[in-house]
Image: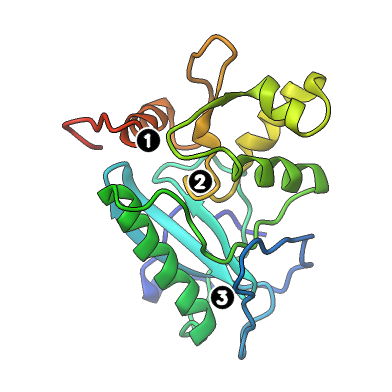
């Protein structure tokens, strides 16, 4: 599998390689059905945002990743980006994701209903699903998230799973903080985490990224 760090220009996109599909879940009322697509491929789109250029990657099952301008190599693994035009159902997912993120950054959206297709271990999928239950503008500790998953002693494992969350912002791992209220690791960096939390609290920063 290849690491997608940023959306390549159309002419520079790499041809997708067949890969074994990982376990996945789709948490949306709208289940995506693909017309025709390259097995294991994703299609990408970029969005200019107050926290930098975001890269969105979607496949036949829904949105697989929302990546930051400077991703750590290996943090999120997604298939190679296809050079073919996106099937209409995949394009619709990307359209929805971009539109809803724009509304979020404008302050008019507090929840997302984009079709999602995160790939991870069973525990990671449970941890990421628990993140989606944290309301807009609120935070919980890693210990509290672990308690909600059934074992408060799993806080370190929860932190590790959150660190691998492939769909930042929409799956809001930025809403999990240290037990003492401190900001801790985040794929987009602590400045981006602070910006998102301030934004949701109605305290937007005057200067973005």
Instruction: Specify which label sits upstream in the sequence, 2 or 1.
Output: 2
Element class at badge 2: loop
Which residue is nearer to you in this view: 153 or 73?
153
Q: Residues within 10 Å of mark 2 (few under 14, many from 20)?
A: many
Which corner quadrant of the image does residue 33 belong to?
bottom right
User: CA–CA distance between discs 2 and 1?
Assistant: 11 Å
Which corner quadrant of the image does residue 162 belong to?
top right
User: CA–CA distance between discs 1 and 3?
Assistant: 34 Å
User: CA–CA distance between discs 3 and 2?
Assistant: 25 Å
Q: Residues within 10 Å of mark 3 (few under 14, many from 20)?
A: some
- Residue 28 position within the rendered picture, expressed as x and y whole percent measured from the top left: 61, 65
Kindly give the residue lying farthest to the left in the view shown.
206
Element class at badge 1: helix
Instruction: Specify which label sits upstream in the sequence, 1 or 3.
Output: 3
Q: Which residue is mark 2?
A: 168
Q: Which residue is mark 1?
A: 196
Per the rendering, the mark at residue 15 is 3
- Residue 111 position within the rendered picture, expressed as x and y whole percent measured from the top left: 46, 52
Element class at badge 3: loop
Point 61% across, 73% down: residue: 41
**Front label number (2 vs 1):** 1
Q: Residues within 10 Å of mark 1 (few under 14, many from 20)?
A: many
**Front label number (3 vs 2):** 2
- Residue 25 position within the rendered picture, expressed as x and y whole percent measured from the top left: 72, 61
Numbered disc total: 3
Q: Quadrant of the N terminus?
A: bottom right
Point 79% across, 24% down: residue: 154
Is residue 95 visible in the rendered structure shown here?
A: yes
């Amino acid at each position: 599998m290849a690491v997608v760090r940023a959306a390549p220009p159309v002419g520079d996109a790499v041809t997708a390689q067949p890969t074994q599909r990982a376990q996945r879940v789709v948490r949306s009322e709208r289940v995506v059905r693909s017309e025709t697509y390259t097995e294991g491929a994703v299609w990408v789109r970029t969005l200019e945002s107050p926290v930098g250029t975001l890269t969105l990657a979607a496949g036949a099952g829904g949105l697989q990743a929302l990546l930051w301008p400077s991703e750590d190599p290996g943090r999120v693994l997604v298939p190679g980006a296809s050079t073919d035009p996106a099937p209409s159902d995949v394009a619709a997912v990307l359209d929805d994701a971009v539109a809803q993120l724009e509304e979020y950054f404008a302050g008019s959206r507090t929840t997302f209903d984009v079709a999602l297709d995160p790939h991870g271990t069973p525990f990671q999928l449970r941890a990421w699903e628990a993140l989606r239950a944290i309301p807009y503008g609120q935070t919980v500790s890693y210990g509290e998230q672990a308690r909600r998953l059934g074992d408060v002693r799993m806080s370190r494992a929860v932190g590790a799973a959150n660190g691998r969350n492939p769909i930042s912002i929409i799956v809001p791992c930025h809403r999990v903080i240290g037990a003492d209220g401190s900001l801790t690791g985040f794929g987009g960096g602590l400045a981006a985490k602070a910006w998102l939390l301030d934004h949701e609290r109605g305290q937007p920063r005057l200067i973005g990224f």
